[in-house]
Amino acid sequence: MSAAPPASAPSAAPARLMAGLGVLFLFGSLVLCAAISLTNAYEGDGAAGPIASAAYWGLLIGGIAGAIALISPVGTMTNAVRGWIVAVQYALVCAAPVLVVIDG
């Protein structure tokens, strides 16, 4: 009697790939936010407000979320949770430049 073949579990590779790309997008968003902040400082009063600080904190949290989704072992979370973490990462990456523009 042969054993039944193991059920194939869905792979975490697509979510990990999206998390890795999100980290690259996060770097680009950081550069964009810095450029907008410097432009606002040069043209405005020279000081960033609390909304710009929230944008940079959001980028930090997005980076941490991306790192968690990227490097956590396969058995520690389901693919659905990993997908939601990546979605939060992308939301924070997209929201940061908008918040910096609003602060200007």
Image (cartoon, helix red, strand yellow):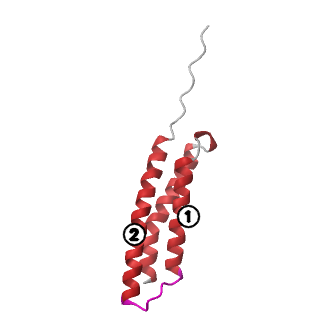
Which numbered mark, 2 or 1, is in the foreground of this view?
2
Quarter location, residue 2: top right
State the residue at coordinates (44%, 47%): 17
Instruction: Specify the quadrant that holds the C terminus.
Output: bottom left
Label drawn at residue 61: 1
Residue 93 in the image, given as x and y percentages of width and height: 46, 64
Task: Indicate yes or no whether the magenta region holds residue 15.
Answer: no
- Residue plotted at (58% across, 46% down): 72
On the image, the x and y values in percent for residue 95 come to 46, 69
| Label 1: which secondary element | helix
Q: Is residue 81 above or below residue 61?
A: above
First along the sequence among labels 2 and 1? 2
Please give the range of residues in magenta.
Answer: 43-50
Residue lying farthest to the bottom in this orientation: 45
Q: Position of residue 51 (x, y in %)?
A: 51, 79
Location of residue 53 in the rendering, given as x and y in whole percent from the top left corner: 52, 77
Disc 1 residue crowd, few under 14, some 14–19, many 20+, Cα 10 Å: some
**Residue most extreme to the top:** 1
Q: Can you tell which quarter of the image residue 74 is in?
A: top right
Element at label 2: helix
Q: Which residue is mark 2?
A: 31
Above or below for 36 versus 12: below
Residue under the image location 62 percent in, 39 percent down: 75
Q: Amino acid at mark 1?
A: Ile
54 or 9: nearer the viewer: 54
Graded by Cα atoms within 10 Å as few (under 14), some (14 to 19) or many (20 or more), the crowding at tag 2 reads few
Q: CA distance from mark 2 to mark 1?
A: 16 Å
Task: Please state which amino acid type lies under the numbered disc 2.
Answer: Val
